[in-house]
Image (cartoon, helix red, strand yellow):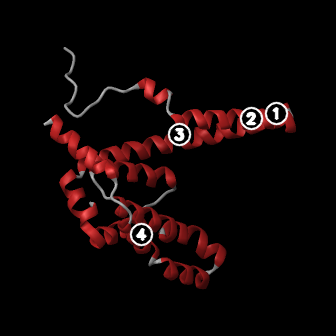
Amino acid sequence: MAKAPHKDEAPIDWRALLLDRGLIAMTLVTALCGAACWYFRGRDAFLDSLVSDLGTLVDILPKMALAFVTAALVQLLVPREFITRWLGERAGYKGVAIATGVGVITPGGPMMSYPIVSAMQKAGAGRSVLIAYLTSWETLGFQRILSWEFPLMGVEYSLIRTVASIPLPFIAAWCSFRLPPDPAPVADAASDKTGA
């Protein structure tokens, strides 16, 4: 017996995915770059680049898959009410401070942080909080500091740069607070009411 789809599940719109303007634009840019590489640098350079890029893709895909699965599980494990209360737009600078702290301790590269941001956004986290998280992760991430800055730039440089960067997530969030509200939560609320 077939399992009934979950109330919140929507069927995948393959046509919308394939006709996505961003995907079409990236495909065209990639094709143009490939043709230019073939024309100006020759067939061998094109094939060498293609093999190298495919190797990078094979290396990255498992990490991306795990990051998206982790983000989806976090979204399921953490109740939406909790996210909205502590990390929603109305949480204010309390949410910004929490997001900044989480950004500092988030390991890994963009393959880990951006799926988390996507999941948190879907779970009800506010725009300013997500901006603070990303700013903190990019400027204050401890893994980057310990792995790259301390060994390559020295302790003094790393400490000065880190201390100077502490206000940045709060400044970014403050700028976001001053912008018009994101219309997405309103649309989500309206769809929730109509779906109820």
Q: Nearer the viewer, residue 133 or 66?
A: 133
- Asked whether the viewer can see residue 74, the reply is no
Residue at (82% x, 33% y) in the render: 38
**Sequence-first disc among 3 and 1:** 1
Residue at (49% x, 50% y) in the render: 111
Mark 4 vs mark 2: in front:
4
When asked about the image quadrant of residue 40, the answer is top right
- What is the CA distance from the residue labelled 3 to the residue labelled 4? 34 Å
**Sequence-first disc among 2 and 3:** 2
Disc on res. 175 = 4
Mark 3 vs mark 1: in front:
1
Query: Residue 119's x, y, as percent?
Result: 35, 48
- In the picture of the structure, the residue carrying the numbered disc 3 is 61
Question: In the rendered structure, are the residues bearing label 2 and label 1 in contact, judged by CB atoms less than 8 Å apart?
Answer: yes
- What is the CA distance from the residue labelled 4 to the residue labelled 2? 39 Å
Q: Secondary structure at mark 1?
A: helix
Query: Residue 172's x, y, as percent?
Result: 44, 69
Q: Secondary structure at mark 4?
A: helix
Extreme-top residue of the structure: 1
- In the picture of the structure, the residue carrying the numbered disc 2 is 34
- What is the CA distance from the residue labelled 1 to the residue labelled 4? 45 Å
**Sequence-first disc among 3 and 4:** 3
Dot 3, how many residues are within 10 Å of its Cα: few (below 14), some (14-19), or many (20+)? few
Give the vertical position of 176 relative to 2 (above or below): below
- In the picture of the structure, the residue carrying the numbered disc 1 is 38
